Image (cartoon, rainbow, N blue to C red):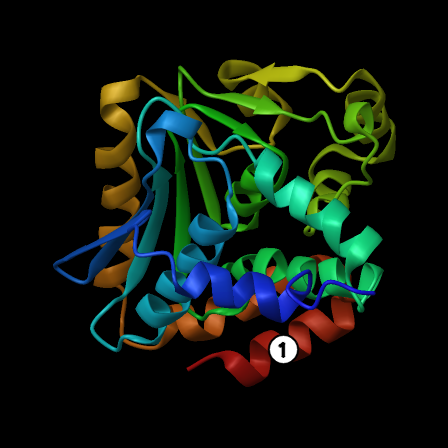
Amino acid sequence: MTNVKASYRGLVEEIQNDRRTLVRVEIENGIATITMDDPATYNALSGTLCYQLRERIEETLRDPDVSALVLTGADPAFSAGGDMRLMQFADTILKEGREGAIGMWRWIRYQFGGVARALTQSDKICIAAVNGPAAGVGLAFALACDMVLVSDRARLVTAFGKIGLLPEVGTSWLFARRLGHHKFMELYLDGREVAAAEAAELGLVNKCLPHDELLPAARAYAQKAGAMPEGLLGLAKPLMRRAADMTWEQAIAMEEYAEP
C-alpha cells in the first residue's frame, strides 16, 4: 500500500505547517536583500528553506517598488545545497509514494527550478553575494543571477558527479557557456572545490572581494541598476540573456526593436 503522505503535495503541506522563518527579506531604497537564514546547517536547502526562498523571491520581484535584488546567505555559508532530510524524503517518495519518480520531478521543477527561473526570467537585475561555501543547488542559484560577487571566504563546490548526480538546475547551460566543454568536464570529473580567486580567474564569477566588502559592493551594483532610466533594464536584461544563443542577424534585429 502506498504512503499518501510520500508525495509532492504531502511534502508541500508539511512545509506550509512549518512556522520557522528561514528566509529574511530587507528592502531599502528599492533594493531587496534576500538572505537564506539557517546558519546552523550552512543554509542547506531543506524543503522549508527552499519553498520560502522561492516564495520570497517571486513576491519581491513582483513588487513595483523593488528595482534590484541581492541574494546571499547568513554567515558562514551561502548554501550547502540540498539537505539530507529532503534527500531521504526523495527516497521515501520513490519507494513508497504513489507518484514514484514524478513526485521528486515536481519538486525539482517547481521548487528548485522555480527559484532559478524567477531569478533568470525577471526583468529586474539579480545579484548573488556569495559569502561562503556554495554547493549543489545553492551554487546553481548563485550562478542563475545576473552578476555573481564572491567573498574571499567563498568556495564553489562542483561535486555533482561525486554524489551521483547530473549537473542540475541550469548548471549544465551556465558552466558550458562560461567555461567551455573541456573545462566543464574537468570540474565535473574532479568534483573539487573552486576557491573564490580561481572562480574569478575562470570567469565563473564577476569579482572576488574581501568579505566585509561583499554586501556593500553587491548593493552598489544594485543601486546602479536602480539609477538607470525606468524600464531600460527590463529591455536590456532579456536581450543580454538570450544574445549568446542568437545569430548576429537575430541579435541586431532584437536590438533595433528594443532600443527605446
The percent coordinates of residue 32 (x first, y second) are 25, 56
Residue type (three-letter) at the residue carrying disc 1: Met
Disc 1 secondary structure class: helix
Decide if residue 82 is in sight here.
Answer: no
Decide if residue 229 is in sight here.
Answer: yes
Residue drawn 31% across and 67% down?
A: 60
Residue drawn 80% across and 16% down?
A: 190
The quadrant where residue 225 appears: bottom left
- Does residue 193 sit above or below 148 in this rendering? above
The percent coordinates of residue 41 (x first, y second) are 43, 29
**Is 143 on the left or on the right of 56, as rendered?**
right
Residue that mark 1 sits on: 254
Residue drawn 59% across and 66% down?
A: 10
Q: Label 1 crowding class (10 Å Cα cut-off): few <14, some 14-19, many 20+? A: some
The quadrant the N terminus occupies is: bottom right
The percent coordinates of residue 150 (x first, y second) are 42, 27
The quadrant the C terminus occupies is: bottom left
Q: How many marks?
A: 1
Of residue 74 and residue 207, the one placed in the foreground of this image is 74
The percent coordinates of residue 136 (x first, y second) are 63, 35
Of residue 127 and residue 82, the one placed in the foreground of this image is 82
Residue drawn 30% across and 56% down?
A: 19
- Does residue 218 sit above or below 251 in this rendering? above
The quadrant where residue 61 appears: bottom left
- Does residue 10 sit above or below 46 in this rendering? below
